[in-house]
Image (tube, rainbow, N blue to C red):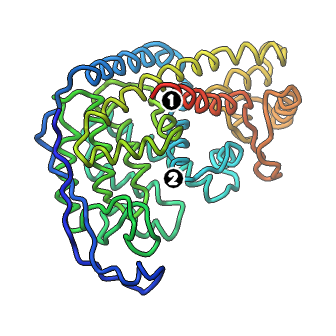
Amino acid sequence: MKWPPHRVEPRPWVARKRQGTRADRTLDSIEVSIPPHIAELDFESTGSVARAQEEAVIAVARLEAGFGAYLAPLADFLLRSESVASSKIEHIDAGWRAFGRALAGAKASDEARSQLAAVRTLATMVDTASGGPITLDTLLAAHRTLMAPDYYTARDSGRLRDVQNWIGGSDFTPVDALCVPPPPELVPELMDDLMVFVNRTDLPIIAQAAIAHAQFESIHPFTDGNGRIGRALISAILRRRKLTHRVTVPLASVMLADTHRYFGYLNGYRAGRADDLVEYTARAAVHSSGAAEESARSLSELPRRWKDVARPRANSADEALIASLLDTPILNADLAQSITGTTEASTYRALDRLTGAGILDVLSESKRNRVWAAVDVLAELDALSTAIGKRTLSDL
């Protein structure tokens, strides 16, 4: 269908400091991209776009009604996968070992803490959306959570930007920027308009999520963190519309597999090609849901495999830990002892035996806060991302 493109307007530019190249220092005007108001717009699709959306809804529903219904750990697994992939798009990648340390509360890198904040942000947004409307306050609170690990960015978190920002190009000015979002004085009204669109219930679900994401990215309402909040908004809308109840569709892994293509569709949306973006998002949902089903199948088989390897005695600490590893794949000694319900010494012996069997791996050797992780679960997280990437590059 025909979707209104962004309008481009010239604006004067006055640099705060004379930095960068000569082009930076002499820049005196810019062209800003102003999104249309979409609160009352309808989206109707036909042909391949309509078919792709139908296939996406079926794929997500199958994932939700299948493994999502009885494999409880899948919810956390997919949520973490989506959050970490979204962070990687922003070049934030601590690696699973460092992320595991952060998750267990051990000393971790700034990147690991940032990835953990992304997990908490997505969880909060999805939980909020499951019980009520998605509001601007929802997004502001999510932004505070996301930015909390960094002292400097945290000071500007949880509020709409009051400065001009830009995407790509120079670090100092909008010279050669891929896109210059609307001026800060237009952001509040554009966000109010977007919130109306986000909470409608008369739009195709996939189209609503895709367009809301692109509109959010076009507004770029924060000084930092826009990509991760904008991608989390997709999952929040799927939950708000009741397409998902437990699972998180790992769409960010599709975007990560080919960021050039992903950003190209966002640029196409600004030119009025909403159909292309919706079809891309729908096909991404099909591929990622299919790969998630395969991961769920692999996860469901792990406890039996662990028992075959470790051969724990009935009612032993080893057996209790194995039974909990899908739910709690990363744990410290205190958490392990609460699971086993036995003595500290017995718990440590069980942890050592499972480590020796290759079921657990030590992520942190700190005497104060030693951290273990279920190797196979971490490996499956990487396998899911790889599988989604292969599907993406071969079809999308």
Apparent side of residue 47 relative to residue 117 in the rendered image (left or right)? left
Query: Residue at point 39% right, 60% down?
Result: 167
Frontmost residue, 18 versus 355: 18
Read off the residue under disc 1: 392
On-image quarter of the N terminus: top left
On-image quarter of the C terminus: top left
Hey, which residue is sitting farthest bottom in the picture?
Answer: 18
Relative vertical location of residue 320 with respect to residue 91 in this rendering, above or below: above
- Could you say which quadrant of the image residue 159 lies in? bottom left
Hey, which residue is sitting farthest front in the picture?
Answer: 22
Q: Nearer the viewer, mark 1 or mark 2?
A: 1
Q: Earlier in the sequence, mark 1 or mark 2?
A: 2
Query: Distance between the Cα atoms at labels 1 and 2?
Result: 19 Å
Secondary structure beneath label 1: helix
Query: Residue at point 55% right, 43% down?
Result: 84
Q: Label 1 sits on what residue type?
A: Thr
The image's mark for residue 90 is 2
Q: Label 2 sits on what residue type?
A: Glu
